[in-house]
Amino acid sequence: MTLQKLRRMTKLIITSSTLYLMAVMPRVVNRPDTSFFNKKYFAHRGLHDNAGDAPENSMAAFRKAVEAGYGMELDVQMTRDGVPVIFHDSKLGRMCGVGGEIGDYTYEELKQFTLADSRERIPRLEDLLLMVGGRVPLIVEIKTDKADVSCCEVIDKALRTYGGEYCIESFNPLVLFWFRRHHNEVVRGQLSTNFRRDGESKVVFSVALTHLLCNFVGRPDFIAYNKEFMKEPGRKICRKLFQCPAAAWTVRSFEELEKARGEFDLFIFESFMP
């Protein structure tokens, strides 16, 4: 190899490495306070039991988490008439046994459905915030896979009136970008997984999300990653090099918790009490 070729190769490696690090870099300047993550354990969709009277993302499950002193993770999406409600799936079938999606119904129409085998109904974000009253910190996942993230304005308006500690997270980097532009003080997290190995998708955009190459869009303050793929290099670089807090989802046993401890800083759990 000639000296000229070696110089070109070295320059290419340096340029590629720099661009990669710039892409995956989280927020590094003027970081907000994330001390509420010291709570460490956040109940996934509340302390729920879908076979009992406190199914996931129900007020009963959230009350149980508050009473036990755990932080909580919850999912927010919009009804047809623009009301932020707490529900995970895009479709209603698994939890309510009816057809359609959350966005097909008004909030008043959704009130006719119950969750799983309980008498609980799909709650509004507003009602959840009033009930919690700042007693435990919240991780609010904003669920939208669309380029139109106007829902963020409505959700942000509800959260601005809340006096307790909270952060937002989303798989959609455009959600993080909205908060970066309009409410930069809010702690924001990028959700991700290995989409190909997780069976989610094989499209290029999902490959970029797997490797956190869209971090330059939203500049997250923490990374929430599927704990099954904790060895993904982008996730490890964010935590080790950039000192970005890492959240593990979803931990379902003491054994999984112990395995994840050295790789994550906080833990979103279900099916057991850590």
Image (cartoon, rainbow, N blue to C red):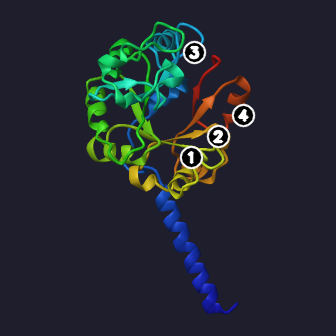
Q: Residue at x 40, y 54 (%)?
A: 217
Numbered disc in front, either 1 or 4: 4
Residue with the mark numbered 2: 263
Q: Is residue 91 above or below residue 10?
A: above
Q: Earlier in the sequence, mark 2 or mark 3?
A: 3
User: Which SS class for mark 3?
Assistant: loop
Residue with the mark numbered 3: 50
Q: Earlier in the sequence, mark 1 or mark 4?
A: 1
Name the amino acid, label 2. Glu
Separation of residues labelled 1 and 3 (CA atoms): 34 Å
Numbered disc in front, either 1 or 3: 3
Name the amino acid, label 3. Asn
Residue with the mark numbered 4: 259
Separation of residues labelled 2 and 4 (CA atoms): 8 Å
Q: Residues within 10 Å of mark 3 (few under 14, many from 20)?
A: some
Q: Earlier in the sequence, mark 1 or mark 3?
A: 3
Give the position of the N terminus as an image quadrant. Answer: bottom right
Name the amino acid, label 4. Lys
Separation of residues labelled 3 and 4 (CA atoms): 26 Å
Numbered disc in front, either 3 or 4: 3
